Amino acid sequence: MKDFALDYRDHYPAVLRWLSHMVDFFLALAGFAIVTLVFCNASLRGFAGFDLAWSLEVTSFLLLWSTFIGCAAAIARGAHMRVTEIVENLLPVHLQRVLSIGIDVIITCLLISLIYTGYNISIHTWAQKTTVLYWPVGLLYASMPVGMLLTLIFHLFNMVFDIRNPVVPHSTHSDGGEALQ
């Protein structure tokens, strides 16, 4: 197991690197749009005494989509938190690897469950419309299965990469871990 962030993107094949760049581009664009909409709406409310009702719906859509797609970006960077001190001090390295693989399998199952559940929620709410823009509510909920599918794609590659390239834990090396030779 490792307690440092391994940016997996350098090891991705071209298609996954492209997908990761598209995820990053979407997140940057969505973040800019959220900040702009919130600033403009707050300014209008403060200076002109009214706000743009549609901006609240757009902002909520962008926030939710950014949250779930941001999960995929974090997985691609190896940036999700792991607390490994207890495991490193109690288990030998070979059992740490087995535990790490087990955790990766559990995460895979959880992601598949979230994709399935999110898809069902999205389908069942697609006919409902939002109040101002009349967008399908299911589009809002579609952020979960789409984000979790992207996360699953990156997670599966990362899991295979970790199995093929084991790492000596931080407690053995002071530089944050080294690949076993």
Image (tube, helix red, strand yellow):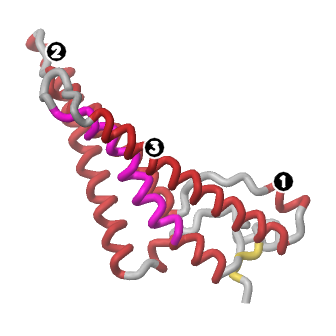
Asked whether 156 or 29 is in front, the reply is: 156
Magenta stretch: helix, strand or loop mostly: helix
The image shows residue 119, relative to residue 130, as above or below, that is below
| Mark-to-mark CA distance, 3 and 2 | 38 Å
Q: Nearer the viewer, mark 3 or mark 1?
A: 3
Name the residue: 21% across, 32% down.
Answer: 127
Label 3, on which residue?
A: 117
Q: Is residue 150 magenta?
A: yes
| Residue 165 within the segment the image draws in magenta | no
Image point (73%, 84%), residue name: 180
Query: Crowding near pointer 3: few (<14 within 10 Å), some, many (20+)?
Result: some
**Percent x, y for residue 110?**
57, 51
Task: Locate the N terminus by quadrant.
Answer: bottom right
Image coordinates of residue 134 in percent, x first then y, are 13, 29
Q: Which label's residue is closer to the chain start, 3 or 1?
A: 1
Which residue is outermost to the left?
A: 48
Q: What residue appears at the point 83 percent right and 58 percent down from the top-left corner?
A: 87
Disc 1 residue type (three-letter)? Ile
Magenta region: which residues? 135-156
- Please name the residue that numbered disc 2 is placed on: 45
Tell me, for residue 86, which label it has, or none: 1
Label 2 crowding class (10 Å Cα cut-off): few <14, some 14-19, many 20+? few
Q: Amino acid at mark 2?
A: Arg
Q: CA distance from mark 1 to mark 2?
A: 51 Å
